[in-house]
Image (cartoon, grey):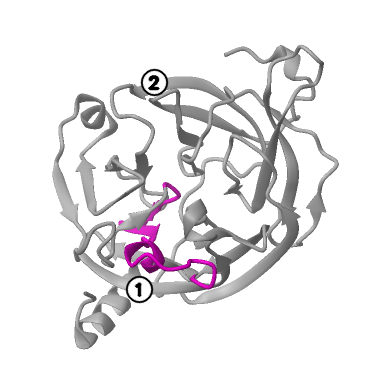
Amino acid sequence: MFVRAAVFVAVFVAVAVASTLPGISLGCQGPVTAFSGKQTIRDDLGVGGAVLRDQHSSSDTVWYLPTYTGNTVEEYRTMGDFEAGNVLTTYRLPGSAGSGGMAWWGQGHVVYNNALYYQRFPDCLSYSYDCSNEKAQIVRYDFNLQAFTALQALPTAQLSHWGQGPSYVYLAVDAGSVWAIGLNNGKFHLTRLNVNDLNVEEIIDTEFSQPSTNMPPFIACGKFYSTVNSRTTQYGPLVSRTALILDLTTKQKDTSTRAWYCLPTVNRRYFSINSRENKVYTVDSNTIMSYDVTFGGSYLTDSATCTF
């Protein structure tokens, strides 16, 4: 399933040399204060997929994972080619959902330095046993080598009982590391992983419970964000506002700031911020969209001004 041991060492060295520089970020001038500039990308693909851009290089390449679990990744030369449906190549990962292979699970994937990072489809679902004692696993797949180069079980990220469906893990890239956002007894645990071998470098217990929300948690520019659905007035629009902002360096937790984000209240499982581009890719009502991300400046404090 994985490349042979001798080859694996050579692969790791090559990847380590290529990954010494963190991704170039256009933003990081402060916290995430707004999402704006809505742009429709595709409206014919449903809600299960994920559009990814490399968060390290300036390449125009687009990768698309078409379902919430699967093993075939589509690659497009540019976003224009993706919009037109002109596939450049495909990558087929060994195994598929339900067979104990290396299929992905969820929509919380990222691409960094031409490698795909994703949550592996849980064995407990493949073989129909209780998921409550199983840990989420993260995989690194190198597009250049067309091979897996790392697999890591997250020490504290639990999966819920299989009858309820296992918990998703959302991945993010920040300051040259991959972060995994998972749950432990209902509270967010953040795991920082080495981008090359996925070794665990840090675990942060936020001590903050997952709220009821339409928007997945996310990490951008050194901060973790969890949101809830709310209104500023009784009849105002239902939008997302921050419930927790946590600084990944100082570990300072801010639960008093009420930053309102003008995004439609749809049930999102896919919400991928790319700090290199200052964009977020998501799905609104069966349509793949992008929004511009504003870093720094003042938070919106009144959702009544939101327009969709």
- Residue found at x 48% / y 71%: 194
Which quadrant: the C terminus? top right
Between 230 and 62, the one nearer to me in the picture: 230
Separation (CA) of disc 1 from disc 2: 35 Å
Residue 291 appears left or right of 80: right
The residue under label 2 is which amino acid type?
A: Thr
Query: As shown in the figure, which amino acid type bears the numbered disc 1?
Result: Ala
In the image, 268: left or right of 16? right
- SS type, badge 2: strand
Callout 1: 10 Å neighbours few (<14), some, many (20+)?
Answer: many
| Residue 126 sits inside the magenta stretch | yes
Q: Secondary structure at mark 1?
A: strand
Q: Nearer the viewer, residue 261 or 157?
A: 157
Which of the labelled discs sits on residue 40, or is there none?
A: 2
Is 38 or 181 nearer to us in this picture? Answer: 181
Residue carrying label 1: 150
Report the disc number at residue 87: none
State the image coordinates of residue 17 (x, y, percent, origin top left): 35, 72
Q: Looking at the picture, does residue 287 appear above or below residue 106?
A: above
Residue 126, quarter of picture: bottom left
Is residue 35 visible in the rendered image? The answer is: yes
**Magenta-drawn stretch contains 103:** no
The stretch in magenta equals 107-134
Q: Quadrant of the N terminus?
A: bottom left
Residue sitting at x 66%, y 46%: 225
